[in-house]
Amino acid sequence: MDASVREADTAKRDRAGMLVAPERGAMAAQPAEGPIAGLRVALVHDWLTGMRGGEKCLEVLCRAFPDATLYTLLHRKGSTSSVIERMAIRTSGLQSIPGVFRHYRHLLPVMPMASRAWKPRDVDVVISLSHCVAKAVRVPAGVPHICYCFTPMRYAWDGREAYLESWRRRPVRLAAARFFLERLRRWDERTSRRVTHFVAISETIRDRIAACYRRDSRVIPPPVDTDFYTPAGPQESSSREDFYLVVSALVPYKRVDQAVAACSRLDRPLVVIGAGPERPRLEAMAGPTVRFLGWQSDEAIRDHYRRCRALLFPGEEDFGIVPVEALACGTPVIALGRGGAAETVDNSVGRLYGEPTIECLMASLQSWEMAGCPHDPRHARGRAEEFALGVFTRRILGLIGEVAGPSKPGVPPRPHLALDRP
């Protein structure tokens, strides 16, 4: 495989390290209609290097506003869906750095400066989709700026100590990193004032926005492809088999090791779908009941959702699309009761457990099994449909209409907590 093909494949790996089709018809949204169809829109996204959950949110807005200009730090051509690739895409100076797509995550120190290249003009509204620097875009005076926030910048806030920990044995570099992250935090908080309306992907992120930026936000969860992830049809087997399932990137913060250890100790069959640097360690610790399948197609994942006893979700995510995909297939979910999963899963569609430990997960599995593995696939499906593409599209376009419809005046930035709860 040549380098260009290998780069394209890497760009299309999703949340479990698996290759994904860049576009699926079921996830299509229609162009905006009515008064907002004539809005002059600028879209801003941190970088375009793959088709993950954030890009699927962006795709909805690209379909709604196909004439918008899309600003981003980097664009690896062909790495996103055809809907996004057709946009007028403007990049920053980082685009011209040789080999940038292999090392761009190490360019965090210069990303704030690179974002200065974004200069939207003659627009009615700016919409940023941000987990890093996209929300820092400078907008013309009086133009509303809606930020769909996946999370405040991790290195500056909740991921700061984890980043510094990697430099503990190098005191000079540790001091330099501490100084840089402190400056980055101040910059991130200061540029949050350029946003007039924050939108959070979950209540977890709403709380984080309030803590970091002292701003309130409206919650609009990201879309899940409930037209693709469905229960087994009448011509297919719908019986549950005797194995638990994990679908995840194999990286430390996903806590896949806890699911592997719990099922190994309890002698329960477990199938792990996903790829990542943790795989050798996980295979070494796994008992004979655990199987690793590596990355799989979306169709294979759906098949496993439909057949497994339950999905195990031991990580703490900002939202967590995987549990909702499983629910859409009528599958029970046993998840850590923190982060976004606590907002989509409860004991009516599976089981939540309180502490991120192997023992707590084991106890949850045992109590759920002793109760007869209760779950109602129709109720699980109904829960997932609350996050369908159509729901997301109506909510996000409705908000844009509220903020920037033809009769709406420009709204100046609000530097303090804004109590605009829906």
Image (cartoon, rainbow, N blue to C red):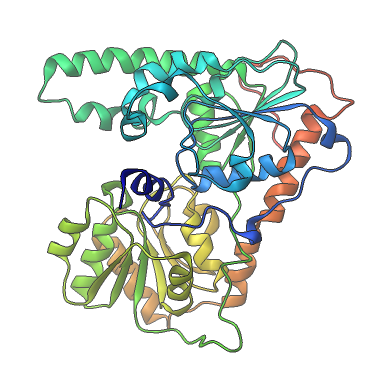
Q: Pick whichever, 227 or 377, lies toward us.
A: 227
Image quadrant in which you'd find residue 358: bottom left
Q: Does residue 140 appear to the left or right of 35 in the view shown?
A: left
**Residue sitting at 43 percent across and 52 percent down?**
14
Q: Pick whichever, 346 or 277, lies toward us.
A: 277
- Above or below residue 8? Residue 271 is below
Where in the figure is residue 58, as x and y percent of width and height? 60, 41
Q: Does residue 352 appear to the left or right of 37 in the view shown?
A: left
- Above or below residue 365? Residue 241 is below
**Residue sitting at 80 percent across and 35 percent down?**
401
Q: Quadrant of the C terminus?
A: top right
Where in the figure is residue 398, as x and y percent of width and height? 78, 41
Where in the figure is residue 117, as x and y percent of width and height? 53, 15
Q: How many marks?
A: 0
- Above or below residue 132? Residue 326 is below
Q: Is residue 415 visible?
A: no
Q: Is residue 213 visible?
A: yes
- Above or below residue 30? Residue 154 is above
The outermost residue toward the left is 169
Q: Pick whichever, 268 or 54, lies toward us.
A: 54
Q: Does residue 293 appear to the left or right of 95 in the view shown?
A: left
Image quadrant in which you'd find residue 273: bottom left
Q: Does residue 380 appear to the left or right of 113 in the view shown?
A: right
**Residue sitting at 37 percent across and 81 percent down?**
370
Where in the figure is residue 404, as x and y percent of width and height? 79, 27
Image quadrant in which you'd find residue 282: bottom left
